[in-house]
Structures are given as C-alpha cells and as structure tokens.
Image (cartoon, helix red, strand yellow):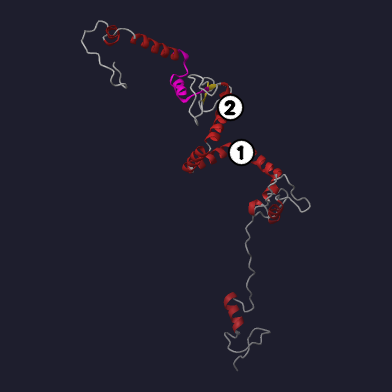
Amino acid sequence: MPQSTCSVESCTSGGKLRHGMCNRHYIRWRKYGDPLGVAPPRVREVKAKAACSIEGCTRPAGTRGWCKAHYHRWYKYGDPLGTPKTPPTHGTRAMYARGCRCDGCKAAEAAYKKAWKAKNPEKVAKYFKDWHLKNKGQRNARRLELYRTNKAQELAKARLYLYGLTQEAFAALVALQGGACAICGEIPAPGVQLHVDHDHACCPSGKKGCGKCVRGLICQRCNHALGLMRDNPALLRTAADYLERARLNAALPRNLWLAAVVRPPGGPSRKRQAPTCLDRRRGCG
C-alpha cells in the first residue's frame, strides 16, 4: 500500500510525497542534508569604532569625534560637557555660537580669533594671500572707488598708517607752515594737499615710517626734487652752484662765452653763427 503521510516522525502532512517526505521536510533535506535541519544563526560582523574623544568616555565616536550624547550636549549647550544645570553664560563663545551678539560674547569671540591668529600666523598669511590673488581685480576696484568718494579720509588713513600722523597733527603742521610748502613757499591749489616729507635715512624701507622722522610738509614738485637728489645736501648745493655759475656765464660777452664753453681749449677754430632764441624749448645754445 503506498505511503500517504510524511515519514518524518510527528509529521502528519500528506499529499504528494518525495522520497517519503512532505514538501517542507524535503526542502530542508535538500538544503541542509537533514529533514529536521534548520538554518545556522547569522552572525553579523560589527566593525570596531574609535572611542569618543572626551576623556573617560568609551562610547563609539561619531560626528566631530564625539559620541551621540556629547555631540547633542555640544549642539544644545555649546559644550560637549555642558548640562542643563550649567547652561552657557553671556560673555562666552558658547553663547556667541548660539546667536548671542552682546558686547561680552563679541569680545570673547574676538579674543579667541586673535589668539588663534597669533598662534597660526602661517595659516593666516596663506589665507589672505590666496584671497588677494583670487580677488585682485575686485579689491583694486573697491579701493579706487573708496579713494574717489572719500579722498580726504583715505589720505588721512594713509598718513596715519605710513607716518603715524593723525589728522589733528597734520592740521597743526599745516597751520604752522601757513599752508605753504616748507621749501618753495608756494600754497597748493584748492583740493590739493601737501606731501609728508620724512627722513629716509631713519626709515630706509620707504614703505612705512616710524612716526618720529617727519621733517615737514612740501609740495609734490619739491618732494620729487628731493627724491631725485637722493636727500643729499651736498648734491643740492652743487646744483645751486651750477645754476648760479650758469647765470654768471650768461652775463659774459658772447664771444668769450663761446670760447670757454663751445670751443674746447686747443681745438681747431671754426666760425659759426650764433643762433637766435626763437625756439624757447631748445634755447639758442
């Protein structure tokens, strides 16, 4: 008589049998080699995480190197060790991070940034150098626009930075000189300010003075003249002697002046007609 039930003990399932087993036990036999076999338990491999960076905490680290508890404390109170009993007070960076902009919180944030900049000068210099190279055109256009719209204010800032000369000290110096150049005595045109003259021997860099070597206020032409003469009094005296000697030679008779200047001593004589000074730019020679 054909078998009508599963051959596995305590199983009463009937129907179509395979190798004397019901469909459920037959699949287990095919999969695990035993009609009563079960799947082995799955073991999930968990990778070890670094511990929280807070001292004494062994929980796995996450965002910012903290565990979830310390991260939420920092997010809520501004301090990974903060608690509801000790909320951040005003005048701290934690309150500044939470949006407080009182004078104390601003001062705390400014003090932190100042200390960080003093501790990392290379990073600060690299940041500003990269920014200036990246925004060179924008920076120059902004400086030019500021100079055009606030010329007097920008010149005052430049004098304070380069020579340590405040606007009050500059005005007092202008009044002391009567508003005129200290060398030629000319008063500049309206809207034109005198130049600050300082001793280059004291501050040879030429970019920024010490503030103690300011000699006076001179016009632009006299300032250029001193620079071309290299601030050398002997050279200036030689130039003055040259001009005075030229005026004395101009008062001599024409033939004597030509003999002394135009024809060198011992050279061949040559008759030449003295030109007239029709062209003021070239002179008569």
User: Foreground residue, 187 or 235?
Assistant: 187
Name the residue furthest right.
85
Q: Quadrant of the C terminus?
A: top left
* Labels 2, 1: front one: 2
Find residue 217 and report its horizontal and vertical position in percent.
Answer: 53, 23
- What residue sits 27% from the left and 6% below the top? 265
First in sequence: mark 2 vs mark 1: 1
> Pointer 2: what residue?
171
Q: Secondary structure at mark 2?
A: helix
Mark 1 neighbour class, 10 Å CA radius: few under 14, some 14 to 19, many 20 or more = some
Label the magenta part by its dominant secondary structure.
Answer: helix
> Pointer 1: what residue?
117
Image quadrant of residue 38? bottom right
* Residue type (three-letter) at the residue carrying disc 2: Ala
The residue range painted magenta reads: 217-234
Find residue 45 and report its horizontal and vertical position in percent.
Answer: 62, 62
Rendered view: 212 above or below 263: below
- What residue sits 73% from the left and 46% below the top? 90
Is residue 224 inside the magenta stretch? Answer: yes
User: Foreground residue, 148 or 41?
Assistant: 148
Is residue 77 inside the magenta stretch? Answer: no
- What residue sits 48% from the left and 24% below the top? 219
Rendered view: 93 above or below 208: below
**Label placed on residue 127:** none
User: Foreground residue, 266 or 201?
Assistant: 266
**70 horizontally vs 120: left or right:** right
